[in-house]
Amino acid sequence: MSATTMTIEVPRQKRVPVPLNGINTPGLFATIDVVRNQPQLGNFQFRAKGEWLGGTHMKTTMADFSGAGGEHSHKAAFTATADHPTVLCGADNAPTPVEYLLHALAACVTAGTANIAAARGVTLHAVTSSVEGDMDLRGILGLSDQVRNGFSAIRLRIFIKGDATPDKLRQIVQQACDRSAVLDVLRNGVSVNVEATG
């Protein structure tokens, strides 16, 4: 007589998302579901308006954008100023435009890291970054057409601590890089149309 065994599979309980790392995780998952079911709501247009202040100093205002099927305004109009340092004939009133590019990269990957960690249920203790961009000024000064005008290389280092294994934390950062809009633009380029009017 042979014994018969029976295996009963208990369904895994789905983890209910809760706010984590300052991220509205339930709202994040709800947004993903809405855009999955209505892809047209994923079309956004971000805008910025610039004004010359004199010399190499300028101010940009970011007040509104469109997306999710409508027009939106930030809770306040945000401004950022840019200038060149004195060694580059500016008054050093603000960071350079290329430093803002480094900031945009760090900000995008950091935000993605926080979102993905929250979605995976990982509590973060710290996320810091270091970004460096190498540039040969002979390009923008018109002294050589053998070097590019922009960065020739960018290095981004992310330092992350949280309640997960080092391998899982690295996977979170990698996914943030894979989904980063700014990193995508830098790696793949984008069509830019420039129009000057009087």
Image (cartoon, rainbow, N blue to C red):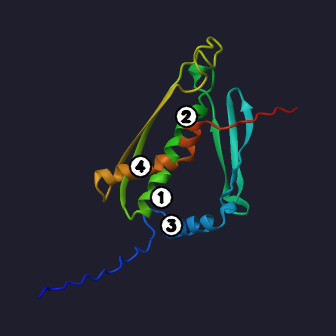
- The three-letter amino acid code for the residue at tag 2 is Glu
State the SS at label 2. Answer: helix
Residue 190 lies in quadrant: top right
The numbered mark, 2 or 3, whose residue comes first in the sequence reads 3
Residue 173 higher or lower than 102, as above or below: below
Residues under labels 2 and 4: Cα distance? 22 Å
**Residue at the spot of label 1:** 115
Distance from Cα at disc 4 to Cα at disc 3: 19 Å
Residue 33 image offset from top left, x and y in percent: 57, 68
Mark identifier at residue 173:
4
Where does label 2 land, which residue? 99
Using the numbered discs, state the Cα–Cα distance from disc 1 to disc 4 in whole angstroms: 10 Å
SS at badge 1: helix
Residue 147 position within the rendered picture, expressed as x and y whole percent measured from the top left: 57, 17
Q: Nearer the viewer, residue 45 or 131?
A: 45
**Tag 4 or tag 2, which sits nearer the N-term?**
2
Dot 3 corresponds to which residue?
Answer: 24
